[in-house]
Image: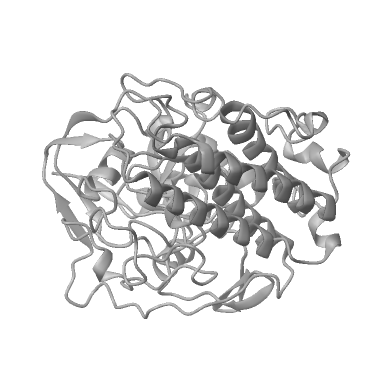
Amino acid sequence: MSDSIKVPDVTALKEKIAAELATVRARSLTYTDIDEAVLVRQHSPLMSPLVWDLAHVGNYEELWVLREVGGITPLRPEIDDLYDAFTHTRGDRPGLPLLGPGEARSYIAGVRGRVLDVLDKIDLDDPDPLRAGGFVFGLVVQHEHQHDETMLATLQLSRQPGLVREGDLPPGRSPNLGASGEVHIPGGIFTMGAGAAPWAYDNERPAHRLYLPGYWIDRFPVSNGAYAEFVAAGGYEDPRWWTPAGWQWVETKGVRAPLFWTRDGDIWWRIRFGREEPVPQDEPVQHVSWYEADAYARWAGRRLPTEAEWEKACGGRTYPWGDADPTLDQANLGHLAARPAPIGAYPQGASPYGVEQLIGDVWEWTDSWFGPYPGFRSFPYREYSEVFFGQEYRVLRGGSWATHPSAVRSTFRNWDYPIRRQIFSGFRCARSEE
């Protein structure tokens, strides 16, 4: 962590950390307060049983806060192998001797009590990078929120109704009323990366300056209605729009629409957390793979933005609207409702360039492979970022409706295989200056 970290008032910071820990744990327990049969079942080979995620977040917290920082004797060393994400694939986890739901809840509660003791005693002014600014607590808070989002994806794959709460969102506005479909971003040098953000991950660092030529980027994410036009135009039947690997995937898997879409006559329907409903034309499209996003962009005469272009469109601030934490009128984050907000719902969240809905609603695929920034250093372990670098994973940006505000920012980098679409993923298009 080469960037210097500014530590705010220690008492206030500890209170904030305690509040964040309480918030994320309440969220985890809410998503797992369901029938035990649902918790222990594997709903898709792509996902772990929910009970694995529940115990895993506690084991991760024990490893990093209690053992690495607190120096506390391991509580359950015999389960470390079971909950090491690199030891067993998701497909193999149902066959492991996992903790049952009650035992998992008891275990993570015991870990959390000791974590709060460590928080009470820790010196957040300590120059050790795990302690400075409470980084280790930010690490476990964000990690648990990420697994909470994974739990939501698993609950969607279960197709069982009544497991996920609904909520209200602001109305949208037509992108054709008073706003052009594209925004011009002038060429020039900008600073990419997290800089001194105290809880940023290693792959967001170091901040570095680079030149980008001018380009155009969509003001809004691509909507369901716009994507349905691609489907209606035969987009899934025409290899011109697909990369060779993407076309092979389409042909092999028989893909003809976003995941969870089905057609009844002239109407597209979707399954959303066990409920069947017409596909809302004005929401950002979600549950599309990188291959589908890239094919749509080619069909539309555009391309996907690079992650540098996406980040520059945010305006060089913590969030597109500034450095203040998100408010309800700026972004759809933290499971306000179990769906993306309509296009144009958050004009208060626009970047200085006028690009909207960059944060929240849907993770946005970019054209970039996941790789290190110049001067990258792994911290606190190689397996968080470094082992994924290369031309295998594509970068996503911006978070989704299921992402908690503490686990996303303009510099945050997500990544996944280009075939993945059970995640809450969408996209927007870009084009170079002519």
Report if residue 246 is visible in the image: no
Q: As drawn, which residue projects farthest toward the front? A: 121
Look at 18% across and 70% down and name the residue there: 179
Q: x, y percentage for residue 51?
A: 77, 51
Look at 59% across and 27% down and name the residue there: 68
| Left or right: where 290 falls relative to 80 | left
Q: What is the tally of numbered marks visible in this picture?
A: 0
Task: Say above or below: 97 vs 409.
Answer: above
Task: Say above or below: 370 vs 398.
Answer: above
For the N terminus, give its image quadrant: top left
Task: Say above or below: 171 vs 175.
Answer: below
Q: x, y percentage for residue 214?
A: 14, 42
| Left or right: where 323 falls relative to 412 | left
Res 261 quadrant in image: bottom right
Return the residue nearer the eye: 329 or 103. Answer: 103
Task: Say above or below: 280 vs 144.
Answer: below
Look at 36% across and 65% down and name the residue there: 331
Look at 29% across and 46% down and name the residue there: 310
For the C terminus, give its image quadrant: top left
Return the residue nearer the eye: 309 or 61. Answer: 61
Report if residue 189 is visible in the image: yes
| Left or right: where 308 falls relative to 56 | left
Q: x, y percentage for residue 429?
A: 32, 52
Q: x, y percentage for residue 206?
A: 31, 27
